[in-house]
Image (spheres, rainbow, N blue to C red):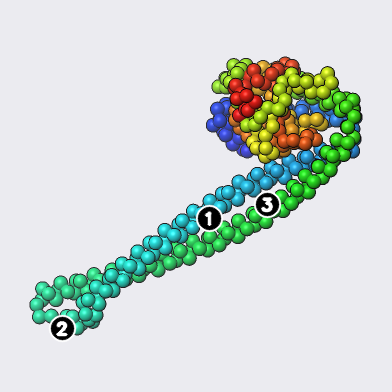
Amino acid sequence: MRLPALILVAAALAGAGLPAWGASGAEEQRAELDTVRERISGLRAQMRDTSGEKSALTDRLQSAEQQIGRLARKLRVLDGRLTRQRQRLANLDTERQAQQRALEGQRAALVSQVRAAYAMGRQERLKILLNQQDPATVSRVMAYYDYLGRARAQKMQVIRDQLTAIAATEREIGAEQRKLAALRDEQAGELAALERSQALRRDVVAKLTRELNDQSRRLDRLQSDERELETLISGIEEALADIPVGDAQQVAFAGRRGQLPWPARGRIVNRFGAPRLGSLDWDGVMIAAPEGREVRAVHHGRVAFADWLRGFGLLLIVDHGDGYMTLYGHNQSLFKEVGDWVDVNEPVALVGSSGGREQAGVYFGIRHQGRAVDPAKWCRRANGRNVG
């Protein structure tokens, strides 16, 4: 990232309640960001090299779900552009209607003036002058005549200007309609690509399900996935141990116990500590929610991981300082990258079913010093199983 761009980022962060930096501070921030990304990238490469079981199906699942994530993110951007384009067209149409109403008003005024001129007898200026005997009357009539003539000319000029303005507005509407049509075509293409990727994913998930039909194999896979996650979290803690996250203007994570928002609106289908399979228990909660719903950060922090991880799909981990981290798994798409700052309630992902799940939802976990803690004790009271 170039220095000027980073300074703009620093200014934006300052506006969000984060500290602003001068030129030297921006250099330090850039170096810190580079360090974070390099360490996490190195950790990820090391995990790939030392991971145990690998399979072609897992690789295909990862590739398909990462592609779905990219397409879903692009479609989200396109939807935003389409919304703004439609609003622009609506504003232009409102402007055109106002111009046409003004034009009708000017035309009506011109008709009144023409009628007034007709009432004066439609006489030529010289004829009016010669027909009058009283000089005062002549002067008054000539003044009326000149006034009506100038008024008619002004009205006609205003009408011409308004017609020109309406024509310009209609040309602009035509251009915006062409842009909108192009955006719709692009959206249709991306939707078709998304459907192809989703079909590929469904095929891979079905094959994986058959492959792991035996309960002991499923248990082995789940245990392996948990070990890989614990290795990742431990590695993140070690990699970021000397890089501060806290800020004096922010309330510490520990001070928000019982007050944190839930990351998504939905229904808890698996509680913390509930039996999962065999000797395994849930170390977080699963919140069932419609695919594509926003997942939001529960507290200020910095993204420490944003990638695909077997068993958790597209996973986002946010470091909140003082040994606290939050985990958001099985997302359809991720909006943030390693090193990005996030604030409370900021959208960071979309609910999905990545990681081979059949039902959409978000896995939400909280870690303190690497140990899993119950999110229900940290977040606002749920309404039964409904949260958010």
- Is 4 on the left-hand or right-hand side of 47? left
**Rendered image: mark on residue 13:** none
Q: Can you tell which quarter of the image residue 366 is in?
A: top right
Observer-nearest of 45 and 52: 52
Mark 1 or 3, nearer chain start: 1
Q: Position of residue 44 (x, y in %)?
A: 81, 29
SS class, disc 1: helix
In this view, the mark in front (2 or 3): 3
**Rendered image: mark on residue 187:** 3
Observer-nearest of 179 and 197: 197
Q: Position of residue 205 (x, y in %)?
A: 83, 38
- Is 222 on the left-hand or right-hand side of 382? right
Residue under numbered circle 1: 89
- Is 355 on the left-hand or right-hand side of 50? left
Q: CA distance from mark 2 to mark 3?
A: 75 Å
Quarter in which the C terminus is drawn: top right
